[in-house]
Image (cartoon, grey):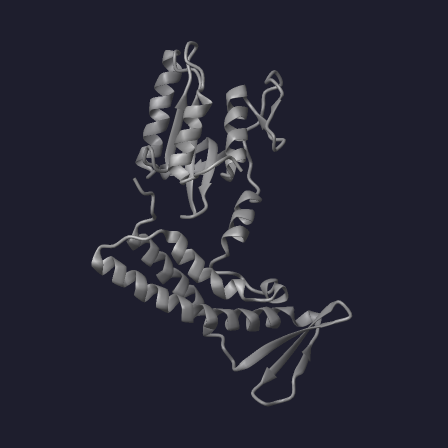
């Protein structure tokens, strides 16, 4: 089974990024931004045509950002329009391709920018390393712990609720799968569920939910599990694709080797542990 983002969704994504870039490019005034470095300090200058360059003070940062965004948008559009044409052709032929290819192409204009320009622009598509870093460092409010909850910490230093969750978290870290613990997932009709683990498919840039259900020999708990899984399914988290589950009971404990195999298969991880 492949887990590719559908070609129609990829094409829709490119269309939306093109519209965003076209909106920014409308602000093109024919003025270009020149960025320099003097004694370790960044300096901004503007130039129109062959005219002499004009110095921008730090109070004119908004103008510097606008000019940098316009230049980036124009460069992005050159790449995005070609990518749209390629995706449309693949759709017409009924072919599929990993979204990783699309993201890599669309990230090139931002990747080519100097660090000083990157600080001024809003990226339409980030290179994968920067995207993952941003995703992993997104702040969110998890669930609180009751005073009598055991103190259990993962290798990353996160507090979790059970030894099984620690095993899961540590295995994800070892396999290089980015995750958020007890991340709030907003579902239809205002429902909110704190997923045990929200994983990131870095190739397709999609989120995958992993729930660990540890009390399956308790009837009330098992019923709540059925409800929770149905909620995910009704919100597009299909079992085996964007929803992964592990189960435990008093007699059956978490099999870490089986869990590792599921993760390796789902995220196409081959070879030895990192």
- Res. 181 visible in picture: no
Quadrant that contains the N terminus? top left
Position of residue 196 measured from the top left corner of the image (x, y, whole percent): 47, 29
Coordinates of residue 114 in the picture (x, y in percent): 60, 66
Q: Nearer the viewer, residue 188 or 71?
A: 71
Q: Is residue 5 visible to the viewer in this orientation of the structure?
A: yes
Q: Position of residue 18 (x, y in %)?
A: 39, 65
In this rendering, would 7 be left or right of 159?
left
Q: Nearer the viewer, residue 35 or 176?
A: 176
Task: Name above or below for residue 99 compared with residue 30.
Answer: above
For image coordinates 25% across by 58% down, the residue present is: 91
Q: Residue 32 occupies which quadrant of the picture? A: bottom right
Q: Position of residue 220 (x, y in %)?
A: 38, 14
Residue 10 figure quarter: bottom left
In the current view of this chain or complex, which residue is farthest to the bottom? 50
Q: Is residue 207 left or right of residue 179?
A: left
Instruction: Say whether residue 205 is left or right of residue 65.
Output: left
């Amino acid at each position: 089974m492949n887990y590719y983002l559908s070609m129609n969704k990829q094409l829709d994504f490119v269309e939306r990024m093109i519209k965003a870039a076209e909106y920014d490019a409308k602000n093109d005034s024919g003025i270009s931004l020149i960025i320099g470095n003097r004694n370790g300090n960044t300096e901004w200058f503007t130039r129109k045509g062959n005219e002499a360059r004009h110095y921008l003070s730090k109070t004119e940062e908004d103008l510097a950002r606008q000019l940098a965004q316009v230049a980036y948008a124009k460069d992005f559009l050159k790449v995005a329009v070609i990518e749209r044409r390629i995706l449309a052709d693949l759709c017409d032929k009924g072919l599929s391709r990993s979204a990783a290819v699309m993201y890599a192409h669309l990230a090139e204009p931002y990747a080519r920018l100097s660090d000083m320009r990157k600080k001024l622009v809003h990226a339409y598509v980030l290179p994968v390393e920067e995207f993952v870093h941003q995703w992993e460092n997104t702040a969110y409010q998890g669930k609180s712990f009751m005073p009598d909850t055991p103190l259990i910490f993962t290798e990353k230093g996160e507090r979790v609720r059970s030894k099984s969750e620690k095993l899961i978290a540590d295995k994800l870290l070892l396999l290089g799968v980015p995750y958020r613990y007890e991340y709030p997932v907003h579902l239809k009709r205002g429902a909110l569920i704190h997923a045990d683990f929200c994983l990131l498919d870095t190739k397709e840039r999609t989120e995958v939910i992993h729930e660990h259900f540890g009390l399956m020999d308790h009837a009330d708990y098992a019923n709540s599990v059925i409800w929770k899984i149905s909620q995910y399914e009704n919100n597009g988290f299909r079992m085996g694709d964007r929803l992964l589950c592990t189960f435990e009971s008093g007699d059956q404990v978490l099999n870490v080797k089986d869990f590792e195999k599921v993760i390796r298969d789902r995220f196409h991880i081959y070879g030895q542990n990192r």
